[in-house]
Image (spheres, rainbow, N blue to C red):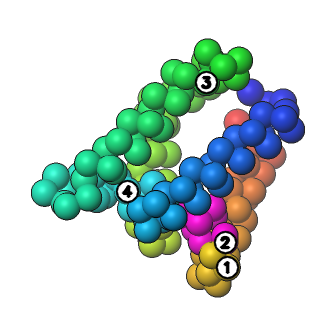
Amino acid sequence: MTEFTPISALIGGTLLGFGSLLLLLLNGRIAGISGILSGALQFKHPNAKWRWAFIAGLILSGFLAPALGFTLPTHLDASWTLTLIGGFLVGFGTYLGAGCTSGHGICGIGRLSKRSIVATLVFMFVAAMVVFITRHVIGA
């Protein structure tokens, strides 16, 4: 999946923004996935039910997207070990950054939070460096 498709990107971005806005307006909550997941894992948390419903929606959307004509990657060019290490590093970065790209990048920037703008710039810079290093230095 290397082709940029502006129409599907526009639709996806609109859905993310609209969903985040609805969660904020109707529930007073930020759509930061790391915060939603950590609250859901605290099973006695008073708001655990909506959090699990949100997570279920994220998972189910992956199955619904192809039925609506969107294509998803079907092959991953990385080993399970590399994928698990990458997942751990993303989780650790989320902990260090006090939030994830959805919380900071979508919701925080939308609220003009200086902390979220800085965090998102750091996320994007590090992502660009990782891509550059893996493609041009290591040659992966």
Total labels drawn:
4
- Left or right: where 73 falls relative to 47: right
Quarter of the rendering occupied by the N terminus? top right
Q: Nearer the viewer, residue 116 or 14?
A: 14
Residue at x-position 59% and y-position 66%: 107
Residue lying furthest left in this view?
A: 44
Q: Nearer the viewer, residue 2 or 82?
A: 2
Residue, disc 3 = 65
Q: Secondary structure at mark 2?
A: helix
Residue 74 visible to the viewer: yes
* Residue 120 figure quarter: bottom right
Label 3 to label 2: alpha-carbon separation: 27 Å
Label 4 to label 1: alpha-carbon separation: 21 Å
Label 1 to label 2: alpha-carbon separation: 5 Å
Which residues, given as a range, are shown in magenta? Answer: 100-110
Asked whether the residues under the numbered discs 3 and 4 touch, taking CB atoms below 8 Å apart as contact, a structural biologist would say no
Q: Amino acid at mark 4?
A: Ile
Residue 21 screen position, x and y as percent: 58, 60
Q: Amino acid at mark 3?
A: Ala
Residue 122 visible to the viewer: no
Closer to the chain start, of discs 4 and 2, is 4
Question: Relative to 38, does residue 83 appear above or below in the rendering?
Answer: above
Residue, disc 1 = 112
Quarter of the rendering occupied by the C terminus? top right
Residue at x-position 40% and y-position 45%: 54
Mark 1 Cα-neighbour bin, 10 Å: few <14, some 14–19, many ≥20: few
